[in-house]
Amino acid sequence: MPEIYARLCADGTLTPDAAQDAVMPEFERMRAALSEPVRTGWFRKAPEPPKGLYLWGGVGRGKSMLMDMFASSLTVPNRRVHFHAFMQEIHAGLHAARQEGVEDALAPVAAKVARDVRLLAFDEMQITDITDAMIVGRLFEALFAAGVVVVTTSNRVPDDLYMHGLNRQLFLPFIDLLKERMVVHELTSPTDYRQDRIAGSKTYFTPLGPEANAQINTLWGTLTGGRAAPHTLTVQKRAVEIPAFHNGVARASFYDLCGKPLGPADYLALAEAARVLVIENIPQLSRQNFNEAKRFVTLIDALYEARVQLICSAAAEPEMLYVEGEGTFEFARTASRLREMQSEEWAA
């Protein structure tokens, strides 16, 4: 792993970064341990698996890139998956096991995961749903007991996971388990490489049409490399569908987010999951689409408070989006926030 990183820096693919280089020993110790043959047979005890790695820090610092590099360098069975997608699979497995009358539904689900891989690489670990919070402790206990090594990225230190969540005291043993079985390492790079990719780029495109679509597509490709998939947020046992999501960058239309009966909790969950959000086709707002306009105001408030980078295409400039009908006075604050969210100061 250090050799791969050094080679990519030398050929100009990556920019040398002291904070990224500092985490190389952690990847190397795991690689070395996982490369040891697993001896089986009488009187041969399986080697103790190495501690995993909980890599946390600000957005755009290269956490996911380093984890992907590590996973792709291994010869042992491993899987790289977004944490939310993995938990959705676990819930589907639990449902199937219960349908079959299994008393402890989690046991066969965890056993199947452990049979398939020796290392699990999770992108963006965060817990926002109580159903996840109540099962991750037993799930990870079973995976660790089976010798599975876990590497994960997160924007939060372990102690801040599921902060302010319902019955959080029941979740705290999971945090202790993470700190016991994984090395917690903060990636402290001062550079936001994701933001650097779009630094100086326009982020608000109007009017709607082919030119705005082309500019949005260019930025999307720069941010995601064309790799994205639908993503589901679970909010208070409801599914909120995001049409495209990759590594903290989300993309949806105005209708996806404001044309459906979503509320503040949904927008807060989106603002926590996505550090960059692309909203397409924001229409002219008026009394004709008053409910959609109200949801849009709530959405922008959530994104603003969470300091999400916003990229959007709209029918008009912010100040001209809502010029007649009830709510025009209140919309002035939203227009001001949309304008501020285009500034270089906001991006920084």
Image (cartoon, rainbow, N blue to C red):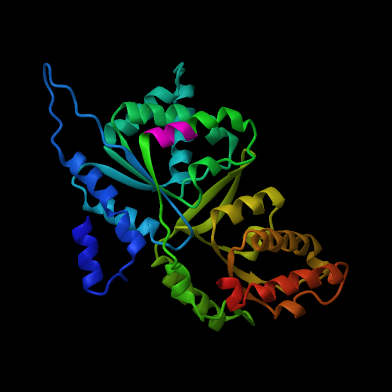
Left or right of 189? Residue 308 is: right
Residue positioned 46% across, 55% down in the render: 57
Residue positioned 68% across, 72% down in the render: 338
Left or right of 13? Residue 333 is: right
Q: Quadrant of the N terminus?
A: bottom left
In this orientation, which residue lies closer to the viewer: 191 or 126?
A: 191
The x and y percentages for residue 87 are: 47, 39
In this orientation, which residue lies closer to the viewer: 129 or 193?
A: 193
Q: Is residue 231 magenta?
A: no
Residue positioned 54% across, 83% down in the render: 211
Q: Quadrant of the C terminus?
A: bottom right
Asked if one can make out residue 59 in the rendered structure from this viewpoint, the answer is yes
In this orientation, which residue lies closer to the viewer: 329 or 38?
A: 38
Q: Is residue 179 magenta?
A: yes
Q: Quick check: 331 above or below 263? A: below
Asked if one can make out residue 136 in the rendered structure from this viewpoint, the answer is no
Q: Which residues are magenta?
A: 175-180
Q: How many marks?
A: 0
- Predominant secondary structure in magenta? helix
The x and y percentages for residue 41 are: 11, 20
Left or right of 194? Residue 165 is: right
The x and y percentages for residue 187 are: 41, 56
The x and y percentages for residue 229 are: 45, 56
Q: Quick check: 34 above or below 346? A: above
Residue positioned 47% across, 29% down in the render: 137
